[in-house]
């Protein structure tokens, strides 16, 4: 049980560190704020598979317009189509077990507290390999897009 609590604490510290760095870099973001987890407003992204849709909950910024910190809720067993994003992004696993990999690479399970960096323009697949939904915190210095590979 202590190991689980330590892992969760490390994940939260990682997310807060990433959020703090991201917020410091966000243009014009000078407002301090605290948002309880239950108050994060998740909405549809339009990215769907047969198991459900990715949901996005803003921490700061607007993912459709520019630099942002966003929580992404991914349904259990979600496997994205091969895709890319124009901008680089980084992500921290808050709950569940994720995978983010490029074509031809083996899956590397990323449990709570794990981190990945995804280079813009590089095709990849993102998965939630848990039996429960996954929650990731994403920081991106530009707007979010989702370009399905041809």
Image (cartoon, rainbow, N blue to C red):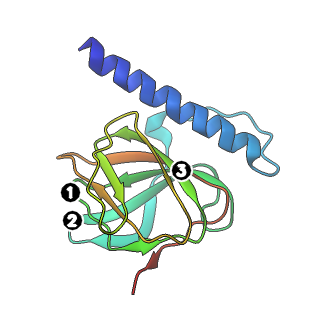
Q: Nearer the viewer, residue 57 or 142?
A: 142
Tally the marks. 3
Q: Residue 32 at what x, y percent from top left?
A: 73, 33
Query: On screen, 51 above or below 96?
Result: below
Task: Tell me the quarter of the picture where residue 100 sits.
Answer: bottom left
Mark 2 or 1: in front is 1
Helix, strand or loop for disc 3 = strand
Residue marked by disc 1? 77
- Viewed as shown, does residue 106 lie left or right of 12? left
Write the residue at 21% across / 45% down.
Answer: 132
- Viewed as shown, does residue 56 lie left or right of 22? left
Q: Residue 58 at what x, y percent from top left?
A: 56, 51
Looking at the figure, which quarter contains the N terminus? top left
Looking at the figure, which quarter contains the C terminus? bottom left
Residue marked by disc 3? 90
Helix, strand or loop for disc 1 = loop
- Viewed as shown, does residue 9 lie left or right of 127? right
Mark 1 or 3: in front is 3
Give me the C-alpha separation between circle 2 and circle 1.
7 Å
Q: Residue 129 at what x, y percent from top left?
A: 22, 51
- Outermost residue, left direction? 131
Mark 3 or mark 1, which is nearer the start of the sequence?
1
Q: Which mark is residue 36?
A: none
Q: Are marks 2 and 1 in contact (CB under 8 Å)?
A: yes
Query: On screen, 39 above or below 34?
Result: below
Mark 1 or mark 2, which is nearer the start of the sequence?
2
Helix, strand or loop for disc 2 = loop
Give me the C-alpha separation between circle 1 and circle 3.
21 Å
Q: Which mark is residue 51?
A: 2
Q: Are marks 3 and 2 in contact (CB under 8 Å)?
A: no
């Amino acid at each position: 049980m202590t190991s689980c609590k330590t892992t969760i604490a490390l994940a939260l510290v990682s997310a807060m560190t990433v959020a703090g760095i991201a917020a410091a870099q966000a243009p014009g973001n000078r407002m301090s704020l605290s948002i309880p987890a239950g108050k994060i407003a998740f909405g549809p992204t339009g990215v769907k598979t047969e198991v459900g849709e990715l949901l996005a909950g803003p921490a700061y910024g607007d993912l459709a317009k520019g630099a942002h910190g966003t929580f992404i809720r991914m349904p259990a067993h979600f496997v994205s189509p091969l895709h890319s994003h124009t901008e680089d992004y980084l992500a921290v696993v808050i709950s569940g077990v994720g995978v983010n990999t490029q074509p031809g690479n083996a899956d590397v399970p990323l449990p709570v507290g794990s981190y990945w960096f995804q280079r813009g323009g590089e095709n990849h697949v993102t998965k939630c390999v848990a039996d429960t939904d996954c929650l990731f915190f994403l920081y991106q210095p530009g707007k979010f897009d989702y370009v399905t590979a041809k």
